[in-house]
Every structure is written in structure tokens, then in C-alpha cells.
Amino acid sequence: MLIRHGLPVRRELSEGIADPELAAAGHQQAEHLARYLASEPIDAIYSSPLRRAQQTAVPLAALKGLAVTTVDDVAESDRNSSEYVPIEELKAANDPRWHAMMSGEHAFGEETPQQFQLRVVTAVEGLIAAHAGDRIAVTCHGGVINMYLCHVLGIEPRQLIYPNYTSIHRVAASRRGHRNVVTMNETSHLRGTGLPMGLVQQG
């Protein structure tokens, strides 16, 4: 399971790395996610090193009694950026950065799409290899999810979908190397909560 982080706070710095934490709504989303997955067997939990992903994993790890293991290579492509503005805010303000993102400009930070995808796929496939027969959860980012799904579907690396906050994307992986997308953008846990989900949806 590749799980996008919850809603982070907005952070814009003149220098340094933004790496925002979850907003109050993001923590609530993470709690709903944990309760939703409570009845499912999960053998290991991994997370991007970025705070929004780490904090999203915490309620699930606590409920399952598992440690959260950090995997550096499932960090987002903009991990070193000095700003993080939720895309919904950029869209609402008709910000030029919104238009740049929609046109595909600056979508992959310091990496090319191919470099970003290679990093992500190598990391995820390594986790799969280490967990034959297991079910694992990886809290990560929208770009990471898109890169791996594009790999499984055999298409060029791009923004395939917009993953909602705490959305679950399930991939079944066989020992023979077969990969199948089972679900995308699974967000049943946010229905009826009133919490933000993404660009066009509320829980």
C-alpha cells in the first residue's frame, strides 16, 4: 500500500528547507486512516523521511504496534524546496505556480522524471523483495505514488492522477515479478468527515 500523507501546513521560507508538518486536519485524516486499516493485516510500515509522511504513519503504527522505518528514496522530488503550499491553496488563489504545475513545469524538483522514477521504483521494489508474502504500508507523496503507478502500468513517468490526502493505492506484487494495480485513490475513510481530500472533494 502506497499512502499519501495528510494535509500539511503552508510554509514559505526565504532560505532553508520547508519540510512542513501536518496541519490539524492532516492529523485527523491520519487518525481516520489508521482506524480504517485497523482490521487489515499489516506486517511492516515504512515512511518517507519528510515530516508530513512520518506523522501520517504514527497513528497506524501505534494501532498496529509496529515501528516506522524510514526509507530515504521515497521522499518527494521537492524535498529540498524552501516552500510548501498545498496545491488547493495555489488553485484557489489562481497562483502562477498552480499554472506551472498544471503545465508540467518544475514538477520533479532537481531530478528529471526518469531519475525520480528510477529512485522510487528501486526503493519500492527493494521493499517488495524484502517482504515476500507480507502486506506493507508506505506513507509517502503524490509524486512518488505517480512514479510507481506509471512504472506498473508501463507508461511514461508523469502526473497520472492527483492522489488525495491519506489516499491508499494498492499494488499486488508476485514473486515472479508481476505487478497489478488493485486500487487507486482509495479514500473511504474520509467520507462523511468534512475533512479536505484534494482538489475537488471534501470528506
Image (cartoon, rainbow, N blue to C red):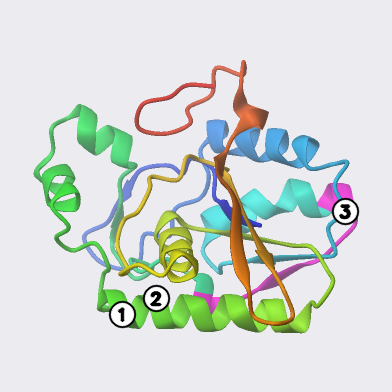
The amino acid beneath tag 1 is Gln
Residue 117 is labelled as: 2
Which secondary structure, mark 3? loop
- Measuring 25% from the left and 78% from the top, which residue is drawn there? 112
User: Real-space Cα distance between discs 1 and 2?
Assistant: 5 Å
- What x and y, as percent, mark residue 199? 35, 32
Image position of 165 (left or right of 131): left
- Image coordinates of residue 57 in percent, x first then y, are 68, 54
Q: Count neighbours of disc 1 (C-alpha within 10 A) and say few if under 14, some if 14 to 19, many if 20 or more.
A: some
**70 in the magenta segment:** yes
Q: Residue 136 location in percent, x, y?
A: 75, 64
Query: Do the numbered discs 1 and 2 sit on residues whose CB atoms are within 8 Å?
Result: yes
The residue shown at (85%, 47%) is: 40
Q: Give yes or no for contact between labels 3 and 1 (Cβ–Cβ under 8 Å).
A: no
Extent of the magenta region: 62-73
Q: Mark 3: which amino acid?
A: Pro
Q: Which residue is mark 1?
A: 114
Residue 50, horizontal then vertical, whole percent: 51, 64
Marks 3 & 2, CB-CB < 8 Å contact: no
Query: What residue is shown with label 3?
Result: 41
Residue 114, by quadrant, is: bottom left
